[in-house]
């Protein structure tokens, strides 16, 4: 399960999505999330899903790598789907004989399918950003996007740096957690049997060394930055200056067409679920 979490990983490549400006990728990711929630029917959701699959294929990253990221949140997807089964109106498909209030309607089934599909699209499209963008590019892009906040004396560079460092060390911490779990199992630790409380208690030998290692890693990183005379973003220059190209303009126009289609579907067609 730990190895299935792919958050923060970068996969090198020279695909169309890799060559896009990081600022454009961040902006389009946020736009996709917004319009994914604006879509209130299956027609709009289908448009966003088509855009998502086009981006996944254009990224050059194996599709199995994307779907691998869904394994870690499969429980959340199933839980959201089952929960929404009982929220809806329409014809009753099933009613609990012991609790007549609990019933499943055709509207509830539409709810469950729609919400589950929305979560899947959200996770898959968000994974493109980290799979095709290096941590350094993310830092520079976030800093440039938030640069207007400097008028309000917000330390933009430091915020972007902290966000990127946190994202960068997620795979490292997950790998270290897997190593500690393997070491504890080799010593005879049983983490898969027993009740809930026993399983929680068995996590203590994992969490303690993980916290100690995390604080030690943070201290080493802080010392390394201090030894290199790092004092924030004031006066710092960039080795690579991002530039907007025709490819970026084409990506924006294509995304705008799909987003306009979602708005059109929302106005023209009634909601597919209630």
Image (tube, helix red, strand yellow):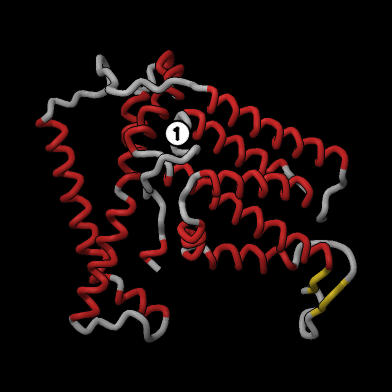
Q: Nearer the viewer, residue 247 or 170?
A: 247
Is residue 230 placed above or below 16 in the rendered structure? above
Q: Position of residue 64 (x, y in %)?
A: 49, 61
Q: Specify the farthest residue to the front.
A: 14
Toward which corner of the image does residue 241 lie, by quadrant? top left
Q: Position of residue 54 (x, y in %)?
A: 61, 45
Q: Position of residue 177 (x, y in %)?
A: 28, 64
Number of numbered discs visible in the structure rendering? 1
Residue bearing mark 1: 19
Residue at position x 49%, y 65% in the image: 71
Residue at position x 82%, y 62% in the image: 107
Q: Nearer the viewer, residue 10 or 154?
A: 10
Q: Nearer the viewer, residue 241 or 136?
A: 241
Is residue 198 placed above or below 28 in the rendered structure? below
Is residue 96 placed above or below 167 in the rendered structure? below
**How crowded is the residue under tag 1: few (<14 C-alpha within 10 Å), some, or many (20+)?**
some
Q: Specify the farthest residue to the left.
A: 227
Residue at position x 20%, y 63% in the image: 209
Toward which corner of the image does residue 153 lie, by quadrant? top left
Horizontal relation, residue 214 to residue 85: left or right: left
Q: Position of residue 148 (x, y in %)?
A: 46, 17
Which quadrant of the rendered structure holds the N terminus?
bottom left
Residue at position x 76%, y 37% in the image: 261
Which quadrant of the rendered structure holds the C terminus?
bottom right
Horizontal relation, residue 170 to residue 22: left or right: left
Q: Secondary structure at mark 1?
A: loop
């Amino acid at each position: 399960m730990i190895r299935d979490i792919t958050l923060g990983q970068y996969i090198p490549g020279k695909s169309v999505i890799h060559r896009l400006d990081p600022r454009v990728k961040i902006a389009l990711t946020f736009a996709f999330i917004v319009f994914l929630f604006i879509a209130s029917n299956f027609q709009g959701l289908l448009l966003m899903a088509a855009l998502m699959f086009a981006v996944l294929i254009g990224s050059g990253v194996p599709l199995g790598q994307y779907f691998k990221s869904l394994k870690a949140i499969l429980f959340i997807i199933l839980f959201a789907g089952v929960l929404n089964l009982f929220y809806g109106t329409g014809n009753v498909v099933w009613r609990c004989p012991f609790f007549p209030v609990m019933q499943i309607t055709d509207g509830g089934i539409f709810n469950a399918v729609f919400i589950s599909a929305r979560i899947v699209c959200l996770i898959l499209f968000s994974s493109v950003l980290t799979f095709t963008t290096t941590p350094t590019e993310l830092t520079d892009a976030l800093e440039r996007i938030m640069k207007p906040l400097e008028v309000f004396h917000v330390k933009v560079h430091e915020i972007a740096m902290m966000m990127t460092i946190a994202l960068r060390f997620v795979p490292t911490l997950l790998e270290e957690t897997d190593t500690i779990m393997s070491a504890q199992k080799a010593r005879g630790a049983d983490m898969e049997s027993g009740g809930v409380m026993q399983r929680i208690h068995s996590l203590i030998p994992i969490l303690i060394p993980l916290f100690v290692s995390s604080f030690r890693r943070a201290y080493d990183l802080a010392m390394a930055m201090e030894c290199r005379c790092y004092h924030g973003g004031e006066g710092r220059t960039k080795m690579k200056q991002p530039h907007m190209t025709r490819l970026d303009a084409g990506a924006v126009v294509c995304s705008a067409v799909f987003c306009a289609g979602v708005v059109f579907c929302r106005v023209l067609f009634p909601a597919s679920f209630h």
